[in-house]
């Protein structure tokens, strides 16, 4: 009897598929990875498009693994991002905490939608997040940015489907087929 | 009959609800934002986070460095030859200028010594590499790869080969933040080289040209005028090129002319920068002379008290 183990296919999980709980180390590693991705030096033109990877990953884990990542973790990550990005201390922290809170309401129903519809909802959340930062900075006396300010939120939403598939890969049960 | 407990027992206790947490961290964030905008109490907190963050930042810079290395390895011989030739021509060109500059400097130094003037700029400088540019659309900042442990001090000027890039505004042990001349809150006192008149250049934020503010429409400013640092601030050494006048709009209906500038340095492009040493301190501001009548009043009061 031979047991062949096949890796799960690179397709989104069926809503009825039971995923294994995410490992804490995997969650932590992806968060740090997203933080590093946010700090990669890029030419100014690409900077306009660059999505906030950390916000996406935080949102994903708040939905999928709320026991590991919640408002508190999101806030701490935001504070780290504030230092890395040389912004006002608390700017990203506030935005990410809001994102984690929104995910709390979001997560019970969002996984029932197909990925592209999830992406549309993610776009709204990310744009709200950006608007919150804008409000904070506007109160602080910053001028209004141009419309391209909201482009990263859109790009982030477009990245949601591939990111979901990648991040849920380790949680999907390995399918073993037994042949005699 | 056994009675059930009035409340369901708390089987899955998970601390305060997300709403409570959000309100708590939200208030904390607003407090931090307020403190960070108005005061400088949070530098130590920033520093602790920065030390933790440092390895991640280094790791993030790695792919770019590796790419540059690979690209350099595959640079063709012909390209190198062409570059070599261009550099040699440039060297000859610069050499002539340098000879002239050498004699001028020697002469200048003699004259300064005669006048017993201290040379303002210490002459030390650190070459730094840009790690990344901040993503924040509201401010124009760079993070560079050297910090306090390498001898970089906050408040020093940062230049590239063409002119002033900005100023070090925050130092960490192993890196430093540079605020660019295009940042909305950045101001440099400059001199218009042609006319010698003083002015102040103010940044306008991302994608907008810096401007000279508070210049009357009748002032002698022309398109193409070179602006150099005046050194009046005690931050920038005098004589560094900063910007060129790109456009002058003299609307007589306005109190001031609108003067748009083009920074000379590769503010968005340069990756190799030079952090200049701190400028020698300016002599202290002379004390305000006491107004004579206040003195007299004081004297009278004293006399009255004495009597």
Image: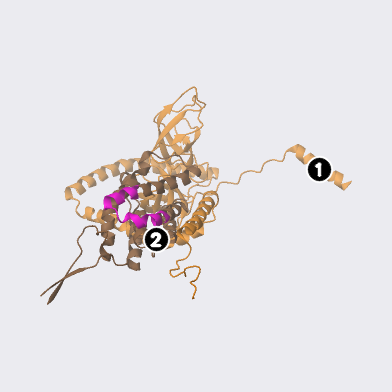
- Element at badge 1? helix
Camera-side residue of A64 and B172: A64
Please report, as a chain letter, where disc 2 is located. B
Percent position of residue B173, x then y: 44, 60
Q: Which residue is mark 1?
A: B299
Judging by colour alone, the chain drawn in brown in this rendered image is: A
Q: Residues within 10 Å of mark 2 (few under 14, many from 20)?
A: some
Which residue does the numbered mark 2 point to in the structure image? B54
What type of secondary structure mainly makes up the magenta span? helix
Chain B's shade in the image? Answer: orange
Query: Which tag, 2 or 1, sits closer to the chain's start?
Result: 2
SS class, disc 2: helix
Instruction: Answer above or below: position of B95 versus B44.
Output: above
Numbered range of the magenta stretch: A101-123
- Asked whether residue B168 appears in the rendered view, the answer is yes
Rendering coords of residue A146 (x, y %): 39, 39
Task: Pinpoint the chain carrying mark 1.
Answer: B
Q: Residue furthest right?
A: B307
Residue B266, image x and y in percent? 35, 43
Q: Residue lying farthest front?
A: B1
Disc 1 crowd rating (10 Å Cα; few below 14, some 14-19, many 20+) is few
Q: Are marks 2 and 1 on the same chain?
A: yes
Tell whether position A105 is magenta.
Answer: yes
């Amino acid at each position: 009897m031979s047991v062949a183990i096949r890796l799960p296919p690179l397709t989104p999980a069926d809503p009825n598929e039971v995923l294994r709980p995410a490992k804490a180390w995997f969650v932590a590693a992806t968060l740090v990875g997203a933080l590093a991705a946010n700090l990669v030096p890029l030419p100014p033109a690409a900077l306009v498009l660059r999505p906030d990877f950390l916000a996406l990953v935080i949102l994903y884990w708040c939905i999928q693994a709320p026991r590991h990542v919640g408002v508190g973790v999101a806030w701490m990550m935001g504070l780290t991002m504030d230092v890395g990005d040389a912004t006002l201390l608390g700017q990203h922290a506030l935005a990410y905490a809001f994102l984690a809170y929104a995910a709390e309401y979001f997560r019970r129903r969002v996984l029932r939608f197909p990925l592209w519809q999830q992406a549309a909802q993610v776009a709204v959340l990310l744009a709200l997040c950006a608007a919150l930062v804008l409000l904070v900075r506007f109160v602080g006396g910053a001028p209004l940015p141009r419309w391209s300010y909201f482009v990263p939120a859109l790009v982030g939403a477009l990245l949601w489907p591939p990111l979901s598939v990648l991040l849920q890969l380790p949680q999907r049960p390995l399918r073993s087929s037994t042949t005699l | 009959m056994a009675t059930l407990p009035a409340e369901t027992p708390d089987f899955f206790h998970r601390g305060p609800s997300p709403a409570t947490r959000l309100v708590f961290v939200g208030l904390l964030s607003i407090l931090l934002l307020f403190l960070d905008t108005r005061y400088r109490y949070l530098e130590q907190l920033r520093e602790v986070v920065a030390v933790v963050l440092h390895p991640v930042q280094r790791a993030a810079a790695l792919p770019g460095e590796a790419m540059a290395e690979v690209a350099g390895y595959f640079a063709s011989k012909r390209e190198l030859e062409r570059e070599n030739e261009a550099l040699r021509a440039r060297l000859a060109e610069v050499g002539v200028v340098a000879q002239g500059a050498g004699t001028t400097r020697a002469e200048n130094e003699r004259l300064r010594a005669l006048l017993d003037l201290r040379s303002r700029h210490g002459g030390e400088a650190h070459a730094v590499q840009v790690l990344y540019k901040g993503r924040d659309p509201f401010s124009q900042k760079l993070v560079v790869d050297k910090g306090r442990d390498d001898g970089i001090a906050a408040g020093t000027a940062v230049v590239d080969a063409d002119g002033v890039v900005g100023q070090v505004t925050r130092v960490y042990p192993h890196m430093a933040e540079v605020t660019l001349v295009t940042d909305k809150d950045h101001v440099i006192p400059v001199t218009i080289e042609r006319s010698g008149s003083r002015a102040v250049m103010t940044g306008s934020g991302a994608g907008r040209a810096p401007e000279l503010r508070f210049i009357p429409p009748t002032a002698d400013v022309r398109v193409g005028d070179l602006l150099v640092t005046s050194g009046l601030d005690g931050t920038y050494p005098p004589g560094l090129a900063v910007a060129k006048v790109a456009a002058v709009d003299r609307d007589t209906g306005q109190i001031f002319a609108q003067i748009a500038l083009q920074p000379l340095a590769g503010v968005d492009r340069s990756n190799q920068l030079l952090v200049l040493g701190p400028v020698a301190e300016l002599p202290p501001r002379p004390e305000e002379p006491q107004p004579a009548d206040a003195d007299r009043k004081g004297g009278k009061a004293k006399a009255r008290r004495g009597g």
